[in-house]
Amino acid sequence: MPELPEVEVVRRGLKRYVAGRTIKAAEVLHPRAVRRHTTGPEDFVRVLAGAAVNDVRRRGKYLWLPLSTGSVLVGHLGMSGQLLLQPAGATDGPHLRVRLQFSDGGPQLRFVDQRTFGGLAVSPATGPEGLPAELAHIAPDPLSPELDEAAFATALRRRRTNVKRALLDQSLISGVGNIYADEALWRARLHYARPTETLTRPAAVRLLAALREVMTAALAAGGTSFDSLYVNVNGESGYFERGLEVYGRAGRPCRRCGAPIRRDPFMNRSSYICPRCQPRPRRAHW
Ligand SMILES: [Zn+2]
């Protein structure tokens, strides 16, 4: 599942290739891809025709495109969604769900989604800078300038949960998924089960710094291609998996201390840790 750096890579590609262009026609090939557009696929097609794309923005893992009509095109990649720029003559793949043609006749924007957990919708722009209402509850992410370090540290330490569960909670901080949570915890030398109320303020600040570092590095590498489905708008994979320190490295030596990385079950998924650098918190902490 794409996380924040991967979605930011897609945003940058869309901004470069789509912003400033006018949509000539939209076509919905699978209604499930626009199920969050509650007035139906025909309305989705109608409201997009003739709209110019003013910009491409992101909040957490959602992309939103302010349109000249005053509405916003909102997109979420889900587990397997891809937003691809392809020439009009390119063959439609079996998982093509939505196609946008532009009035300049140039490359089309195609939403391809094998598992159809992602989707597109057009919403009224209601919030600050035209943010649609459905994204208003999503907290700032580690890469957004409005995320305040002191406020994050306070909010994190107030949670009554463990530190990894808190990182995955999109109302505390958005855009952090399993991969980058594990990577940041390793960098900050924290165990995933550490109760948040036992974190010192410096540890909370260190954890945020680690999140920012790992996401910035991942962004520079074009994201992590943990499966073949994540690609940028030109269909290219990122290569940050080489930069991962713990995720997917069970049994291999920790690059800091040499102890074998361990994979533990966590919330129906996995947590990868170095048992030496990230010792389980003492019982007194629970
Ligand atoms: Zn280690």
Image (cartoon, helix red, strand yellow):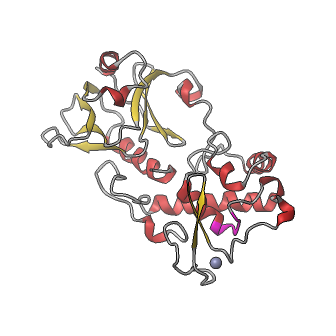
For the C terminus, the quadrant is bottom right
Question: Where 3 falls versus 242 (above or below)?
Answer: above
Residue 209 percent coordinates (x, y): 67, 60
Could you say which quadrant of the image residue 284 lies in? bottom right
Magenta segment: 186-191
In x, y percent, where is residue 183?
58, 64
Residue 256 within the segment the image draws in magenta:
no
Residue 190 painted magenta: yes
Note whether 112 is above or below 51 in the view shown. Answer: below
Residue at image x 29%, y 44%? 84
Residue 203 placement, left or right of 239: right
Determine the residue positioned at 63% across, 68% down: 186
Using the image as rendered, state which of residue 272 and residue 131 is in the foreground: 272
Q: Position of residue 69 (x, y in %)?
A: 40, 19
Q: Does residue 157 sit above or below 273 in this rendering?
A: above
Residue 10 placement, left or right of 151: left
Task: Tell me if 222 is positioned left or right of 245 in this view.
Answer: left
Tally of numbered tags: 0
What residue do we see at 36% from left, 37% from top?
116
Location of ligand 1 given as a quarter of the image: bottom right
